[in-house]
Amino acid sequence: MAHCSVRRNWILGGYAAEYAHALTISSSQLSELIHGVLLALHTHLGCDKQFKLTRDFKGRDGLDTLIKEIPGDPTNEVFRLGGLIATEKRGEDDFEWSQFNVACHAPFREFEGTHHILHALDIRRDDSVPAWLPWRLLGAAAPIRPRYFRLGVERFQTRFTFASFGFLPQVTDSLLIDVFDQSLSCVVRTEQSTWSLGNPLAGVPLFAAIADALRISTNFDINQSLLEELKATGRFR
């Protein structure tokens, strides 16, 4: 069931909102979700052709853990997925399976002027995952049986800060999705300096693409659900 809370932002002005929802999905839906999300990241996250840098985005805060059973350190983590992968074929329909884990982190790189911030993109995979297999195809590749998936993307926008008496990029919107076995939890956060709230999923191409991947794979329309919850707060514009 969806839930949305709104609070005044006394430091930046305006309001901040947090939306949360949980649902149950199947193994095939998880694979399709991973495929759609990884393609969205590959298309919209990197700001260079080699997918080594991202501008005005980073991975999740280390304290933002929705499902504790997912292993690994989530600090600055963009995504993590793992489960079982076939490493050797023993018969026509018989494989030898091994554990696998692939993660992408986005450590701070540098400020780009006063309005933008760059983070590096560092993708690491276990030796069980073939080097020739592109990470963006891990959701569609077979035979792979994903068990968990964690996505965390935070977006920066330039805001005036009294601490520095100038403009600095600050996190204003976050999208988190955690999946373990058949349990999926998602959270959307937004901080806006106006007296009314807009939908961050509609205004950010990366978030919109991830929302589409979630809808296509699970038939859950997070964009529509968020809109309904924001309207119910009386602060939607």
Image (cartoon, rainbow, N blue to C red):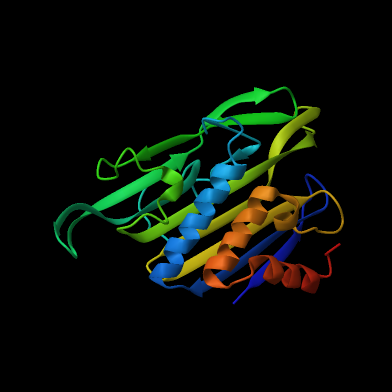
Q: Which quadrant holds the N terminus? A: bottom right
Identify the residue at horizontal 30%, vertical 58% (top origin).
143
**Residue 70 x %, y %:** 38, 57
Q: Nearer the viewer, residue 56 or 96?
A: 96
* Quarter occupied by residue 165: top right
Identify the residue at horizontal 71%, vertical 34% (top origin).
169
**Residue 2 x %, y %:** 62, 73
Would you say residue 137 is visible in this rendering? Answer: yes
Left or right: where does residue 4 sit relative to residue 218? right
**Residue 20 x %, y %:** 60, 66
Q: Which quadrant holds the C terminus? A: bottom right
* Quarter occupied by residue 53: top right
Identify the residue at horizontal 64%, vertical 67% (top origin).
222
**Residue 199 x %, y %:** 76, 59
Q: Nearer the viewer, residue 196 or 117?
A: 117
**Residue 61, placed above or below residue 209:** above
Q: Nearer the viewer, residue 124 or 188?
A: 124
